[in-house]
């Protein structure tokens, strides 16, 4: 028995999220089907966490147990040949039998993309939230500082969250202006990306943080309101849940994994 | 009567090219339909040139004559509201009645994107030619120097070309490594973009140049072979036509247009 750990990137546009659903058409289903086609084994893969419908992943991590003797360096290409084009396995390695993609994860980074130009970017529509009206980027950046550290993030969790504790630690939250090389118009705000790293994230947490940060950027709230909302521990205080398509699971970090 | 000039970007994936076809579903059809919905006028638009099926445009330019009195600053949003999401008008201005998008164009830049990483990029699949095997980038860059200047580009034109003269001037041809921010794996070659600027391009010219440059990068030919192929004035000497999806009309330049 081997425990294989893989990094996969996917465009979530066409899928009902990562995790298997009764109706099928999830990223997990496609991965398990590809493994079945390759090995004949019906495995259940374990991911670092689920992603919702329409959410993307640059580097999702999953592991599974197999009896297959296929050499580790053959797995990526062999699975990619059996996967749809919008799911690509980038890395495969054999890990100890104790390794568990979710429980062993130490940190995760998500990226949320806001296109703040006047018109949508036809080449990245499905990867961005288009917000054509004015935003105060400095206030948005300031608001993020209140999130750093260990806090109860109840205000930024879906009401459907069933987690016992809503305490999580955010290590970093950076809002960066990225050069928008395909954009024709240079007189505009450009593309903003929020990179947020924590030891774990509650359901919809990044998207609610973004929805709140956008209210601040729009001038409806001030940066200090982020603090007020955080200590209030009430979902109703925060902003709306930003659209799924802007969100990407960027990277998952482990202690003993190269 | 007003002559309106517009810049439009489009993702060509879903269309049979720019120019109207008997079967419809072209970018020109969609633009003319949107103008009709907005003004009630059945106009024929003139573009800087056609783009083939699957080819994209960051900044295609077109113009048309209209009796409409709609103020110029309203056109972009009004048309975008009547266009599919993969076609976006970025700029509109009123120009002299003599202005003609094709005949008045002085220079054009195309961009061709090669993903030279081991695995495809799920987020940009439809915008790149994926070439996973080794490439000698230096030789490719050297080969491009032979194209600069005024030459007969018969070797790099589709045999279907009906142009009287195949003489064109290439002002610049740069092959650049771009930072691949969404790529997970950093141990790979990355993304290569060819930016090529000339006073005009023959049918398939950029794609045949790319196909030839790739042969050189693969080590099948040497950089000097670009010169031999150019002076041979025979399409059969050059490499294959690279896939359409990697090509993007980047920018069109005019003398008197801001």
Image: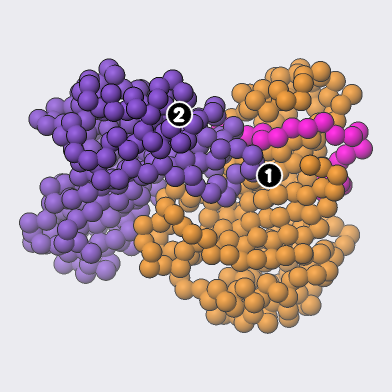
Chain colours: A purple, B orange
Between marks 2 and 1 in the image, the one whose residue lies nearer the viewer? 2
Q: Which residue is mark 2?
A: A217
Q: Position of residue A125 (x, y in %)?
A: 50, 37
Q: Secondary structure at mark 1?
A: strand
In the rendered structure, does residue A4 fall within the stretch colored magenta? no
Q: Which residues are magenta?
A: B85-105
**Image x and y of residue B36, in percent:** 73, 22
The reply to whether the C-beta atoms of the residues labelled 2 and 1 are less than 8 Å apart is no
Residue A54, given in percent of the width and then of the height, sits at 37, 35
Image height of B176 relative to A226, above or below: below
Q: Chain of mark 2?
A: A
The one of A16 and B249 positioned closer to us in this rendering:
B249
Instruction: Determine which residue is flagged by label 1.
Output: B59
Q: Is residue B63 above or below residue B152?
A: above
Q: Residue at x 32, y 56 (%)?
A: A89
Q: Badge 2: few (under 14), some or many (20 or more) residues near its Cα, within 10 Å? A: many
Instruction: Please count the marks in the image.
Output: 2
Side of A135 relative to B70 (left or right): left
- Determine the secondary structure under disc 2: helix
Q: Is residue B100 shown in magenta?
A: yes
Q: Residue visible at 19% across and 55% down?
A: A254
Q: Are marks 2 and 1 on the same chain?
A: no
User: What residue do we see at 25% from left, 27% from top?
Assistant: A230
- Residue A241 sits in which quadrant? top left
Up-down relation of residue B100 to residue A132 (above or below): below
**Is disc 1 surrounded by few (<14), some (14 to 19) or many (20+) residues within 10 Å?**
many
Q: Chain of mark 1?
A: B
User: Of residues B20 and A149, which is closer to you in this image?
Assistant: A149
Q: Is residue A104 visible?
A: yes
The residue positioned 23% from the left and 38% from the top of the image is A201
């Amino acid at each position: 028995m081997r425990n294989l750990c893989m990094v996969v990137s996917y465009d979530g546009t066409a899928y009902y999220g990562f995790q298997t659903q009764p109706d099928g058409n999830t990223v997990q289903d496609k991965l398990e089907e590809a493994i079945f086609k390759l090995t004949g084994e019906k495995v259940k893969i374990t991911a670092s966490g689920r992603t919702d419908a329409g959410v993307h992943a640059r580097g999702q991590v999953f592991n599974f147990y197999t009896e297959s003797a296929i050499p580790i360096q053959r797995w990526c290409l062999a699975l990619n040949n059996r996967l749809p084009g919008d799911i690509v396995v980038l890395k495969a390695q054999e890990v100890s039998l104790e390794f568990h993609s979710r429980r062993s994860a130490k940190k995760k980074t998500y990226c949320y993309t806001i296109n703040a130009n006047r018109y949508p970017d036809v080449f990245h529509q499905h990867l961005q939230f288009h917000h054509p009206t004015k935003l105060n980027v400095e206030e948005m950046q300031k608001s993020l500082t209140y999130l750093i550290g260990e806090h109860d993030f109840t205000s930024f969790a879906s009401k459907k969250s069933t987690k016992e504790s809503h305490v999580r630690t955010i290590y970093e939250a950076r809002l960066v202006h990225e050069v928008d090389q395909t954009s024709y118009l240079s007189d505009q705000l450009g593309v903003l990306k929020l990179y947020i790293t924590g030891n774990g994230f509650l359901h919809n947490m990044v998207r609610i943080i973004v929805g709140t940060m956008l209210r601040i950027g729009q001038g409806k709230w001030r940066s200090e309101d982020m603090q007020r909302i955080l200590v209030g521990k009430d979902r109703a205080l925060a902003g709306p849940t930003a659209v799924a398509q802007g969100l990407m699971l960027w990277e998952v970090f482990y202690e003993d994994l190269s």
